[in-house]
């Protein structure tokens, strides 16, 4: 489906510079800068869980800034972007606010899309969480909420930063979350699909807080084997799909939850990683993602789905134009008309992230 003639909000991108800012992958980036190693060799030397998650590590060890995004967006008419936090590793409890300040300083809107909103990092279990939220708000008027690294997977071969299987449901998290709710800020939930019931419980406890589910719940292994024992055969993948389908339906019953149709090209879903420069063909992507998008459209409706490219994380599998085409086509084939496509690709994001307020 052609998006020409439509202005698009890309509601999920990452900006980083591991060479000049404190990212978790800064050390590796600086090593490659001063001790050049062929990227294909670096990929082979990386732990399997890292290889399966990132696919091609190239974008992670180089800056990815507004001009890089603009080049990747190509003919997709992106007018506004939303930055989502990614692995800022500064010192001190208020350090995540430095990412918000840094992103706000980037040259958006200079022959590049405008910056519409920023989702910063923060952990409600930390005693300084409320103070951090104020620091984020002081750093930029475009700050709209936080994302916490809570992704956990029972397969220890699947990359996950959270070792607690139920951090979202812990008393410390739920109590600290009140500071977010009291300020009318949103929460971005990046979880693996087995954690969807935890997101549902959070939505029940805080019904007035907007929760944005990232990447349709990231059902790792749904397209192919990953980790030690995830998605290893068609039977396992079918079971994974059925559980994801049922849990997503339960989550969608809560009106305060919206979902991003983003991250569907992440290697961790089980996509085979193609050769660099040879992205996966759109018909192949469409065949894989259509059942997921059909169900998401059924349970959330077009007014609670938001598109995001998840670039550059998805770059090893596809391009932004191909990803947008695959998503738009899948939705249209399931009955979404032009108005519904416009909602998913623009107006829902404008509403959820209050982009028109500035």
Image (spheres, helix red, strand yellow):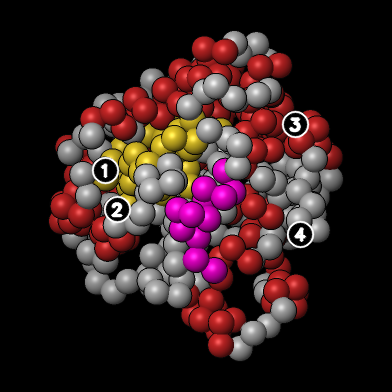
Q: Seen in the image, is 207 located left or right of residue 18?
A: left
The overriding secondary structure of the stretch rendered in magenta is: helix
Secondary structure at badge 4 equals loop
Q: Residue furthest front?
A: 111
Looking at marks 2 and 1 on the same chain, the residue that comes earlier in the sequence is marked by 2
**Location of mark 4 (residue):** 276
Looking at marks 2 and 3 on the same chain, the residue that comes earlier in the sequence is marked by 2
Task: Give the CA distance from mark 2 to mark 1.
Answer: 8 Å
Pair 3/1: label in front: 1
Q: Is residue 344 above or below residue 100?
A: above
Q: Is residue 98 visible?
A: yes
Residue 87 lies, in percent from the top left, at 43, 63
Looking at marks 4 and 2 on the same chain, the residue that comes earlier in the sequence is marked by 2
What's the mark number on residue 104?
2
The magenta stretch spans residue 71: yes
Q: Measuring 65% from the left and 24% from the top, which residue is drawn there? A: 2
Do the residues under discs 3 and 1 have CB atoms within 8 angstroms?
no
**Location of mark 3 (residue):** 286
Q: Where are the magenta residues, as a range?
A: 62-73
What's the mark number on residue 254?
none
Secondary structure at badge 1 equals loop
Pair 3/4: label in front: 4
Q: Seen in the image, is 19 located left or right of residue 208?
A: right
Secondary structure at badge 2 equals helix
Pair 2/3: label in front: 2
Do the residues under discs 2 and 1 have CB atoms within 8 angstroms?
yes
Q: Measuring 34% from the left and 39% from the top, which residue is drawn there? A: 116
Do the residues under discs 1 and 4 have CB atoms within 8 angstroms?
no
Residue 341 lies, in percent from the top left, at 55, 19
**Location of mark 1 (residue):** 142
Q: Seen in the image, is 95 located left or right of residue 167?
A: left
């Amino acid at each position: 489906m052609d998006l020409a003639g439509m202005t698009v909000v890309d509601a999920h991108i990452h900006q980083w510079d591991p060479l000049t800012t404190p990212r978790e992958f800064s050390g590796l980036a600086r090593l490659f800068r001063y001790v050049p190693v062929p990227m294909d060799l670096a990929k082979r030397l990386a732990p399997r869980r890292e290889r399966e998650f990132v696919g091609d590590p190239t974008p992670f060890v180089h800056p990815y800034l507004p001009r890089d995004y603009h080049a990747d967006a190509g003919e997709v008419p992106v007018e506004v972007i939303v930055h989502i936090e990614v692995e800022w590793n500064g010192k001190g409890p208020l350090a995540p606010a430095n990412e918000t300040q840094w992103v706000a300083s980037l040259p958006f809107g200079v022959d590049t899309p405008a910056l519409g909103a920023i989702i910063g990092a923060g952990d409600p279990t930390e005693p300084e969480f409320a103070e951090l939220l104020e620091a984020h708000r002081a750093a930029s008027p475009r700050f709209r909420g936080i994302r916490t690294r809570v992704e956990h997977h029972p397969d220890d071969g699947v990359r996950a930063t959270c070792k607690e299987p139920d951090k979202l449901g812990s008393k410390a998290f739920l109590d600290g979350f009140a500071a977010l709710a009291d300020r009318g800020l949103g929460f971005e939930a990046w979880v693996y699909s087995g954690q969807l019931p935890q997101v549902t419980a959070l939505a029940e406890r805080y019904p007035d807080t907007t929760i944005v589910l990232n990447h349709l719940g990231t059902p790792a292994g749904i397209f192919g084997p990953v980790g030690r024992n995830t998605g290893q055969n068609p039977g396992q993948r079918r079971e994974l799909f059925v559980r994801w389908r049922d849990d997503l339906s339960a989550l969608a019953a809560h009106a305060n939850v919206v979902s991003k149709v983003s991250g569907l090209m992440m290697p961790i879903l089980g996509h085979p990683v193609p050769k660099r420069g040879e992205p996966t063909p759109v018909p192949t992507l469409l065949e894989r993602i259509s059942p997921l998008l059909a169900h998401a459209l059924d349970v959330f409706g077009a007014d609670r789905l938001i598109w995001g490219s998840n670039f550059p994380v998805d770059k090893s599998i596809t391009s932004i134009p191909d990803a947008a085409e695959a998503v738009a086509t899948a939705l249209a084939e399931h009955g979404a008309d032009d108005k519904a496509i416009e909602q998913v690709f623009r107006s829902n994001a404008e509403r959820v992230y209050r982009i028109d307020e500035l």
